[in-house]
Image: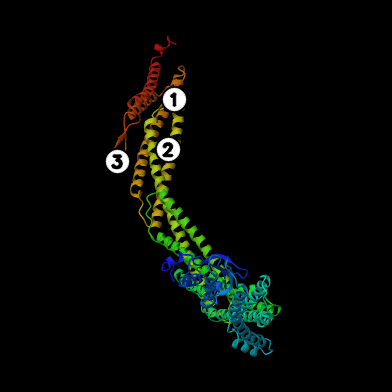
Amino acid sequence: MEASVILPILKKKLAFLSGGKDRRSGLILTIPLCLEQTSMDELSVTLDYLLSIPSEKCKARGFTVIVDGRKSQWNVVKTVVLMLQNVVPAEVSLVCVVKPDEFWDKKVTHFCFWKEKDRLGFEVFEKFTKESTSLLDELALINNGSDKGNQQERERSIDLNFLPSVDPETVLQTGHELLSELQQRRFNGSDGGVSWSPMDDELLAQPQVMKLLDSLREQYTRYQEVCRQRSKRTQLEEIQQKVMQVVNWLEGPGSEQLRTQWGIGDSIRASQALQQKHEEIESQHSEWFAVYVELNQQIAALLNAGDEEDLVELKALQQQLSDVCYRQASQLEFRQNLLQAALEFHSVAQDLSQQLDGLLGMLCVDVAPADGASIQQTLKLLEEKLKSVDLGLQGLREKGQSLLDQISNQASWAYGKDVTIENKENVDHIQGVMEDMQLRKQRCEDMVDVRRLKMLQMVQLFKCEEDAAQAVEWLSELLDALLKTHIRLGDDAQETKVLLEKHRKFVDVAQSTYDYGRQLLQATVVLCQSLRCTSRSSGDTLPRLNRVWKQFTVTSEERVHRLETAVAFHSTAEKILQECPDQPEAFHEMEQFDEIEAVGKSLLDRLTVPVVYPDGSEQYFGSPSDMASAAEHIREKMKLVSLKKQQLRQPEATTPES
């Protein structure tokens, strides 16, 4: 019923729920009667609406109705009370009437009121007695069945009568409310100041209700214990069943999955595929491990609150479950570590293979360096690559040995299966990879040694070519110095001899330079033959060296001839000039003067002649002024010799002077 439909009637406030409660926690319904005539239909509609608002639980406690008749006629009050008894007898527990001013028949009215009220309470009493008796029989059957010695009979009895036909809590609550009502009636009757005596049935109902309540509480307590034991046994059986499911799967399909996974793969891709397969296996195991965690928590809770008789069984289940799960988890972790080690091994092997391929490719390319610096750089790069290969091979050996150690421990959880064949395949593969890498590295080292020797020879070739070219330059510088600075012929025989000795040492230096250049060029030829290449300067340096040496030799010979002629000239001239004029017999041969003059003239003539080289080219010693200075000393000494000659021929002319 919606309030909007009866809103005009509700606004008259013919009845209302004040929100208060009585000692039984029942709601209080107030009906304020007034002087005006109250419509029973409207009052009935109002009561129906108000009684539909509370919950069923509140209605079960009953309502206390207060009828305020102080402003109304007594006949209206009686009509309202009768309507309550006829319309809503089940919901009304107590009716309190506030008397009107014209109240005159108290006894009759009081008697009639409680008479009607007794009729309502008797129906509740009969219903409670019937339900409680039936419930006691059912609970006794359940509880007695649980006390039998035979486990199967007890479980069968409990299964057949496990749930009572009515709720014991509801029956107990109804009994307590009925007992409270009976006690309240007696209390209200004795305190009302009215001479009132309860009926015999009511006197007998109260102890009967109390006895039924005591029996119900006792049987219900036993029933709750039976339910608790049954729930605990059921929970224990469920845990045991789940434990066996976990154990059976881990020791069955789970272990079988691990038995079939023994390989480590022969490459990175194969190892990654095995890892992916292992992750799928771990994913399946993780679901059962989650069940294990949940079961372990349940068992721990039961151990904390369990009975002594269940502790041994629970601990055995917990130990069995933990052993299987930890063993399987250890196997999964071992397999994961093995695959990770295999992946790292194949990764290092692949990197090392790529390094060897790069080094081999570098060695297979012919070297055509431009100079020694580029060769040194190439050698340094080769050494770095070879060192990197050494480190890579060392890392591969370490990874391989670690993987072999793990494989050797693999038989510890083989479940009795002979894994020798599978392990042998894995071991042979690992050792084969390491041996193959060692052979490839050894071949590369041999090729590096050959390449290193070749490059060192090329460095030596470039060095020889550069030094040979330098020898040619040095020889050219010596020739230039000979022509430009070796000009003086000396002022006397002693000085000329010193110059001649210096010139010979100078020639020795030039000779050693020439020999050094020849040796370098010969070494260049040998290196070119060894390297099977053509020298860049073999067709140019040697002719240049020979040409410069020829020029130096011709120039040196000319210089020696001039110095020797000068020595002869100075020696003879000095000898003649130093002779005493009183001994003319020493110069009985006047031809010596003529010879000295001839030598002097020949020397002067030679100073004016250029050096002619084999190729027809000519070159003068020094500048014209330098040559004139050297010739001037010769002419002066020739003048002294000529003067001496004249003195010897004409002694009478020279005597006065002396």
Residue type at mark 3 is: Asp
Label 2 SS: helix
Q: Is residue 41 above or below residue 653?
A: below
Residue type at mark 2 is: Val
Q: Are marks 2 and 3 in contact (CB under 8 Å)?
A: no
Disc nearer the start of the sequence (2/3): 2
Disc nearer the start of the sequence (1/3): 1
Q: What's the distance in space between the residues labelled 1 and 3, CA to CA?
A: 35 Å
Horizontal arrangement in the rendering, residue 80 relative to residue 519 (left or right): right
**Quarter of the image that includes the C terminus:** top left
Label 3 SS: loop
Residue identifier under label 2:
507
Crowd class of label 3 (few under 14; some 14 to 19; many from 20; radius 10 Å): few
Q: Quadrant of residue 597?
A: top left
Residue type at mark 1 is: Asp
Residue identifier under label 1:
492
- Asked if one can make out residue 266 in the rendered structure from this viewpoint, the answer is no
- Asked if one can make out residue 570 in the rendered structure from this viewpoint, the answer is yes
Q: What's the distance in space between the residues labelled 2 and 3, CA to CA?
A: 21 Å
Q: Which residue appears at 68% of the width and 86% of the height?
A: 147
Across and down, in percent, residue 39 comes to 46, 70
Label 1 SS: loop
Q: Nearer the viewer, residue 180 or 189?
A: 189
Q: Is residue 160 above or below residue 325?
A: below
- Mark drawn on residue 170: none
Q: Which residue appears at 41% of the width and 14% of the height?
A: 651
Q: What's the distance in space between the residues labelled 1 and 2, CA to CA?
A: 22 Å
Residue identifier under label 3:
615
Mark in the foreground, 1 or 3: 3
